[in-house]
Each structure stands twice: as structure tokens, then as C-alpha cells.
Amino acid sequence: MIHKIAIIGNGKVGTFLAKAFAKMGLDVSVYARNPKSASQKKLSELGDDSDLCIICIADRNIAELTKCIPAQKGIIAHSSGTVPLEALDSRHPNRGIFYPLMSLQAHSDLDIKTIPFCLEASADTTLRDLKSWAQALELTYYEINSKKRKQLHLAAVISHNFSNFLYHWAWQELTKVDIDFKILKPLLAQQVNSLNSKDPLLQQTGPAVRGDQSTIMAHQELLENPELADLYQKLSTLIQKSNEEKL
């Protein structure tokens, strides 16, 4: 069973996972090129005796790093949503993916058991070990290959990162007229709570669906930034076309 864990990287993801696993009673060590505290170790101190080594660094550096560290006797995995399994150097016999589908903060109190983890491995035995370990910790996990994980990451960026920018946009518009953004929270919560396995387009509402051009034009007149006014129009047009196709 996996017990001794080495985490490479002391950013948001690495710090969150290290704290969460330590809280579960696992033996966790954090390694980084530039340690931030006395409890962290220099990357040069990394050995080969961990049961699981999780790489939590920038995507662009993962492949090169796996060529430089000692060949791991246990499982070596990365936490990226886009880097393929093949990026892990073949010197490591047990290669895998341990991707948390969540926007993690270093000092968040989020329950790790609520996070969906995407698992993949270079061999059936390695995947079985990862799944058995995840089950023992009561983690939520899905077996998803690199091609599907890349598509999943795209969907996560669209639904989470892009929507957050739209929240920011809405916040800006409310700030102009001194209205607290929290007035929108019940509406937003209703939308999220209504999501299920069906296409969200089936629940689309608003002036674009109704073909209410007068409201759309009135909204655009309120938008002082021409780029945002153009984006509003493009989104409205896409919603209208999608609704027509649905019908």
C-alpha cells in the first residue's frame, strides 16, 4: 500500500496535496528547487524510495524534470490536466497520472475527498495500485486516458475559468451603480444546482433565447468597453443559433 509520498513542487497544488495527505496520516515530503520553509527539502535530496512521487510543477517543465531525477522504484505521476502520460521518462518503470479536477489553493480547507481525481498509468498493475490506494483513502476517482483528459481540461477551462471572467465582468457592471455582487449569488447558485447529466442548453434562458433584440441592444448601449459589447453580441448570436438548432 502507498504510504511514503514525495511531492515535487511547492506551489498551490503541491502544497495543498502535501497538507491533505499529511492530515490523513501519510508520510509526506515536499521537494523543490527553492524550498519555502524548513520542512521542505531541496530537489537534489530526492531519493528513489518513495511509494508514490507526484510532480506538481509547470506543465512545460514536467518532461525534462523526469529525465533529471533518480529513477523511481515506486510510482511516479504528475498532476497536469494536459501533459500526456508519455511525457514521463521511461527510466521510471511505474508511470501514472494523478490529476485533481479542481482549482486548488495552497491553504484551502477543501475536503480532498470531494475532489475528482483522474487516474491513468503505463501498466495495469500500476493503475491497480493507484486505484486501490485511492479507494483506501476514500478519494473520488475516474480512469481517464490522456486524450480524454486533455478534452476534459478544455471543458474545465471553458466552464470554470471563462465563467469566472464573466463573473468579474458582471461585478464590474454592478460596481458602476454601487450594487453588491452578492445579490447575484442566489441566481448563480440556482444555475449550478440545476446542472445534471443533460445538456445545459436545455435550460438556457435570457433575451438571446427569446430573440429579444431590443433588450440585447439596450444592454450593449450600457457597455462602455467596445470589446465587451462585441463579446456580448457574439455570445448572444451563439446562443440564438444553438437554440435554433435545438428546436
Image: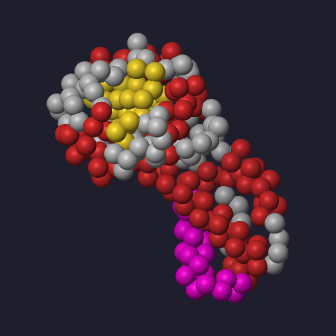
Dividing the picture into quadrants, the one containing residue 211 is bottom right
The N terminus is located in which quarter? Answer: top left
Relative to 176, does residue 148 appear above or below in the rendering?
A: above
Q: Is residue 12 magenta?
A: no
- Residue numbers of the magenta segment: 221-247
**Residue 232 in view in this figure:** yes
Q: Nearer the viewer, residue 148 or 28?
A: 28
Who's the residue at 17% across and 32% down the image? 90
Residue lying at the far top of the rendered structure: 1
Q: Position of residue 156 (x, y in %)?
A: 50, 50
Relative to 103, does residue 3 appear above or below in the rendering?
A: above
Who's the residue at 54% across and 68% down the image? 238
Dividing the picture into quadrants, the one containing residue 93 is top left
212 left or right of 67?
right
Who's the residue at 27% across and 27% down the image? 47
228 left or right of 26?
right
Q: Nearer the viewer, residue 236 or 230?
A: 230
The C terminus is located in which quarter? Answer: bottom right
Q: Position of residue 109 (x, y in %)?
A: 65, 37
Q: Is residue 232 magenta?
A: yes
Who's the residue at 34% across and 32% down the image? 77
